[in-house]
């Protein structure tokens, strides 16, 4: 039996078996189980399992943090045990509605559903772009075949990102995915440069990701309304025809200009904050980003990062916010050397490598947040790193993982500054955690004792 099979068996038993699981899915680091009766779960036993880096309770859902790579294998084993496919709901009547669904949370949930499926392509393309950057720095001919091929591989996804965003937007709002893809094409098509409206030529890409989301959303509304009145026999012809015509004219006359104003406003706001606030702005942005991640509000920043690259071909926000993970790493290392709890040490050893690679959830929910004060000191460490990045005006040139891998995506000539900022965040997170201390956990029952101070 593999380690993943054994872990899946333990999780399955502790949560009450397949009768107590109504739905299951997973993301990059978490196995998400929708639970019928939360009272049947041995939460302390679940948290103490070797391989479990943390557990988050969210209404009727358990989010079990396992880390990248591991989570997919364990999810497959859970599927084999329950017979419930990832994403499949066993019984709709057993689902308990989340009473905390505010309009903001629902909006952020929609954004997450649009962009999270794109993360593997974003990361892969971003890293290829980073390798291109490294190759040029090492002296490879920028006009040569090798670099040209790398550019095509790395930048292709970002060039046509609007189509993917349109498809996912249509899916999320229950429209036809292909028509959503057309919304992306309407925005990025170079041919629109020949169209003049109110004396002004349209600009391909104007409105960016925000424009695509607006147009795709509008087209799903039109599609649904048209389908109500069109006979079934004519639906395949009439519905897409009317949807595309209405969506196209609405795009060029209204929605693309609105998306342009929205994207310009957001980007100019962040530029103003960084230009006026400098290091202080970087300190605040990086220092407050971990609570933002916990609340889920960081999902709203994905299109902002995309739009920085779309408009300016450089993103000053990404290196600053990446310091949040670096502060976590420094704090976790301090906890590792101070704690006497062997299980906590094991969690840190498992979570540190992925934390260094830019995936901070295992460290947040498995180490610093449960201990309390180390979460705050990690934010302090992040703030110092962010202040340095802002002061040095460090920019990324593509999207990808944060942490050390982001160094490959930093603007040429600024990589040393970025890595220095990471070291500052590591050191500040470590020192503040070491000085402030924390309430350590007992080996047996994980009750806090004054052992970390």
Image (spheres, grey):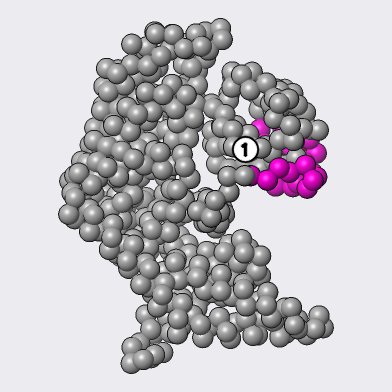
Against 373, residue 156 (above or below) is: below
Q: Residue 356 colored magenta?
A: no
Q: Residues within 10 Å of mark 1 (few under 14, many from 20)?
A: some
Q: Is residue 148 visible?
A: yes
Q: Which of 274/391 is in front?
A: 274
**Helix or strand or loop: what does disc 1 sit on?**
loop
Residue shown at 22% from the left, 59% from the top: 272
User: Residue 133 appears at what percent x and percent y?
Assistant: 31, 53
Q: How many marks?
A: 1
Residue shown at 62% from the left, 44% from the top: 99
User: Residue 13 appears at what percent x and percent y?
Assistant: 74, 23
Q: Which of 225/130 is in front?
A: 225
Residue marked by disc 1: 59
Image position of 146 (left or right of 419): right
Image position of 45 (left or right of 400): right
Residue shown at 32% from the left, 66% from the top: 265
Q: Which residues are magenta?
A: 71-98
The image quadrant where one finds the N terminus is: top right
Q: Which of 14/229 is in front?
A: 229
Image position of 332 (left or right of 384): right
The image quadrant where one finds the C terminus is: top left
Q: Is residue 329 visible?
A: no
User: Residue 29 appears at what percent x and percent y?
Assistant: 55, 37
Residue shown at 24% from the left, 32% from the top: 424
Against 280, residue 262 (above or below) is: below
Residue 67's image quarter?
Answer: top right
Q: Residue 97 colored magenta?
A: yes
Against 304, residue 384 (above or below) is: above
Residue 403's image quarter?
Answer: top left
User: Residue 211 appears at what percent x and percent y?
Assistant: 45, 71
């Amino acid at each position: 039996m593999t380690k993943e099979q054994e872990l899946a068996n333990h999780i399955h038993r502790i949560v009450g078996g397949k009768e107590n699981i109504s739905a299951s899915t997973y993301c990059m680091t978490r196995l998400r189980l929708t639970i019928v009766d939360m009272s049947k779960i041995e939460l302390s036993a679940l948290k103490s399992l070797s391989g479990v880096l943390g557990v988050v309770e969210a209404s009727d859902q358990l989010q079990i943090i396992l880390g990248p790579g591991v989570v997919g294998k364990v999810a497959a084993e859970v599927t084999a045990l329950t017979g419930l496919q990832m994403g499949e709901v066993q019984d709709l009547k057993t689902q308990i509605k989340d009473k905390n669904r505010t309009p903001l949370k629902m909006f952020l949930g929609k954004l997450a559903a649009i962009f999270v499926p794109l993360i593997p392509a974003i990361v892969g393309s971003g890293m290829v772009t980073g390798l291109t950057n490294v190759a040029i720095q090492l002296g490879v001919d920028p006009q040569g075949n090798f670099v040209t091929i790398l550019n095509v591989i790395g930048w292709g996804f970002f060039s046509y990102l609007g189509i993917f965003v349109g498809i996912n937007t249509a899916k999320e709002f229950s429209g036809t995915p292909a028509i959503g893809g057309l919304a992306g094409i309407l925005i990025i098509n170079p041919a629109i440069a020949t169209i003049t409206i109110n004396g002004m030529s349209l600009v391909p890409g104007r409105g960016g990701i925000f424009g695509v989301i607006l147009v795709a959303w509008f087209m799903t509304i039109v599609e649904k309304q048209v389908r109500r009145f069109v006979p079934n026999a004519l639906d395949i012809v009439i519905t897409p025809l009317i949807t595309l015509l209405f969506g196209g004219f609405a795009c060029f006359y209204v929605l693309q200009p609105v998306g342009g104003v929205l994207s310009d406003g957001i980007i100019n706001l962040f530029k103003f904050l960084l230009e006026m606030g400098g290091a202080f702005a970087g300190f605040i942005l990086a220092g407050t980003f971990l609570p933002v991640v916990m609340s889920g509000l960081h999902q709203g920043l994905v299109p902002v990062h995309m739009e920085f690259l779309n408009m300016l071909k450089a993103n000053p926000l990404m290196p600053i916010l990446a310091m949040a993970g670096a502060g976590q790493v420094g704090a976790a290392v301090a906890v590792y050397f101070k704690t006497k709890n062997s299980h906590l040490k094991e969690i840190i050893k498992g979570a540190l490598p992925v934390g260094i690679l830019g995936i901070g959830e295992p460290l947040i929910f498995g180490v610093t947040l449960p201990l309390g004060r180390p979460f705050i000191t990690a934010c302090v460490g992040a703030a110092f790193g962010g202040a340095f990045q802002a002061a040095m005006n460090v920019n990324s040139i593509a999207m990808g993982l944060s942490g050390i891998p982001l160094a490959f995506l930093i603007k040429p000539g600024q990589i040393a500054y970025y890595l220095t900022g990471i070291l500052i965040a590591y050191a500040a997170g470590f020192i503040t955690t070491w000085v402030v201390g924390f309430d350590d956990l007992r080996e047996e029952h994980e009750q806090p004792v004054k052992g970390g101070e």
